[in-house]
Image (cartoon, rainbow, N blue to C red):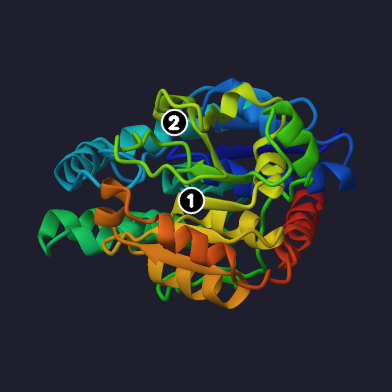
Amino acid sequence: MPAHLFVDISSHGFGHLAQTASVLNALRALLPELRLTIRSGLPHAQLILRLKGPFTHIPQASDFGLSMKNAIDVDVHDSLARYQAMHANWDALVQAYAQQLADIKPDLLLANVSYLALAAAREAHVPALAMCSLNWLDILTPYVSASPSQEKIQAQMLDAYNSAKAFLRLTPGMPMPHIKNKIVIGPIAIPGLAQPDLLRRHLNLTPATRLILVAMGGIPMPLPSTWPILPGYHWIVPQAAALPRNDMHTLESIALPFSDVLASSDAVVTKSAYGVFVEASVCGKPVLYIERPDWPEEPFLVEWLMLHNQAQGISRAQFMQGTFGTSLQALLQRPRSTASSLTGIDDAAQFIKIQLLQ
């Protein structure tokens, strides 16, 4: 019987899918007959874009991370209320998920990065791994004040994460001092194929036109009406954020994978986020990022980015007022960075293969 891997992928944006898909694609090259079951609240169409080969999709979300008002702003009040509600029903949620695993009978569970999935795997006696650059405990903790109810929630989260056989912590990533089963591995991303001439022809642009990708990680973020107009620059933006302007095309109108569009662009404007930071650094594309001072993962991502790429932070006010054009132009004048290597993909695929075949 082919090995059967059950994978739980967070639907908090598209970054968790990007991390996981690159590893699953490499794993499938090692184990061509691998059976995959994917539990995720992400649309099936998004999974197909990233994953190679057949899989069974269970369209259920196991985590929400934090509630977001948009791609940058955390809704702290709603996040805390959702965690309270989730953990008030914790035992029942674990039992229901464990029964699902008992019915499916996978050989191994991989979570990025639901702790509920790990708790359920332990209950169902299914070996489990976690993999991510963050965990929801370390993301949540800075937003909560000390109280008995919060301490219980945090204890249940930590217990679930530590129940896994290993937590493959990607580079760059949070330190995770309380995760006892942590194994640090290298960067992970899906490297794109640079086709700048093809992309410019598709958009009917001159070879000298600068192409700037705007990527906010799958959570809606409307562009402000003050978005700068820069002669000789053309913006590629998500359809939900597009403005009615001649210097913009939507990402969805381009018949290329996201990673290829990024690799074919001259720079990317984004929030601080693992996926875009690493993908841009792999293909040596400069990054102009909106600073998120309250996001707990940001310092560790930015520290790595500054060592491996040309990058510049801008404030939320600069983004909203559209006053970042000069910063972008200056960024593009810097020497091109050397592409980073994706050692984490093979590290993770080989580790998971060993666990599957035990």
CA distance separating discs 1 and 2: 29 Å
Left or right, residue 264 beside residue 127: right
* Amino acid marked by disc 2: Ala
Question: Residue, x 60% and y 71% (percent of image)?
Answer: 334
Q: Quadrant of the C terminus?
A: bottom right
Q: Nearer the viewer, residue 315 or 307?
A: 315
Left or right, residue 195 beside residue 48: right
The dot on residue 269 is: 1
Relative to 15, does residue 171 appear above or below in the rendering?
below
Q: Quadrant of the N terminus?
A: top right
> Callout 1 environment at 10 Å: few (<14), some (14 to 19), or many (20+)?
many
The dot on residue 187 is: none
Q: Position of residue 185 (x, y in %)?
A: 66, 69
The residue that disc 2 covers is 61
Element class at badge 2 = loop
Residue 109 visible? The answer is no
Q: Position of residue 64 (x, y in %)?
A: 36, 39
Q: Position of residue 252 (x, y in %)?
A: 58, 24
Element class at badge 1 = strand
> Given this view, does label 1 or label 2 mark the residue nearer the observer?
1
Q: Position of residue 253 (x, y in %)?
A: 61, 22
- The quarter of the picture where residue 340 lies is bottom right
* Amino acid marked by disc 1: Val
Question: Residue, x 39% and y 59% (percent of image)?
Answer: 159
